Image (cartoon, rainbow, N blue to C red):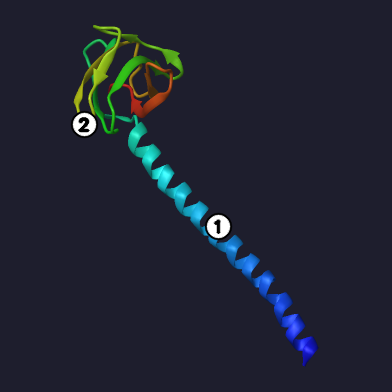
Amino acid sequence: MKNFRRSRKALSPVVASIILIAVTVAVSIAVAAWMGALTVGFMGSSSMTVTNTTFETGNAYVTLAVKNTGTKSVTIAQIKVNNVAATINGTATFTYAAGASGNIGIASAWVAGNPYKIDLYDSSGQVVGSYQANGPS
């Protein structure tokens, strides 16, 4: 009987240690998830969507209808067509508040039926939107 009691006492600190470790891990996971949710809320997201493309007569100009689908303001500083910088007509940059939409004109030589990948870059150089379009028909 004495041996049984001794081994039972020895088991108690082991079980207590396992329970403390499990509780610590659970609390740390909860705190990490909570902090991650706060960070996303403060940082916001940048995302632009091209909703339509209109090719003008002569195939040298296209108008992109864009919408800011992110949660913070986005400034479009550069547009690349098939990984080549395109000439933006009008102002050098376009700024759109969250949910805002507008038009951006690009001057380039377009070939009817050819596929084009249009990438929108913000002022920090990050891609905030991409669009696949076929040249005018």
Identified at 26% across, 8% down, the residue is 89
- Answer with left or right where residue 58 lies relative to residue 113: left
- Residue ID for mark 2: 99
Q: Amino acid at mark 2?
A: Gly
Q: Amino acid at mark 1?
A: Thr
Q: Is residue 28 above or below residue 113?
A: below
- Residue ID for mark 1: 24
Q: Is residue 59 visible?
A: no
* Separation (CA) of disc 2 from disc 1: 42 Å
Q: Is residue 24 visible?
A: yes
Location of the C terminus (image quadrant): top left
Q: Residues within 10 Å of mark 2 (few under 14, many from 20)?
A: few
Residue lying at the far right in this picture: please name it. 3
Identified at 37% across, 11% down, the residue is 86
Element assignment for label 1: helix
Location of the N terminus (image quadrant): bottom right
Identified at 44% across, 20% down, the residue is 82
Element assignment for label 2: loop
Where's residue 122, x and y in %?
37, 19
Identified at 60% across, 61% down, the residue is 21
Q: Is residue 99 above or below residue 12?
A: above
Quarter residue 9 falls in: bottom right
Which of the numbered marks, if any, corresponds to residue 92? none
- Answer with left or right where residue 70 lies relative to residue 32: left
Residue depth check, mark 2 versus mark 1: number of the one nearer the observer: 1
Q: Is residue 65 above or below residue 22?
A: above
Mark positioned earlier in the residue sequence (2 or 1): 1
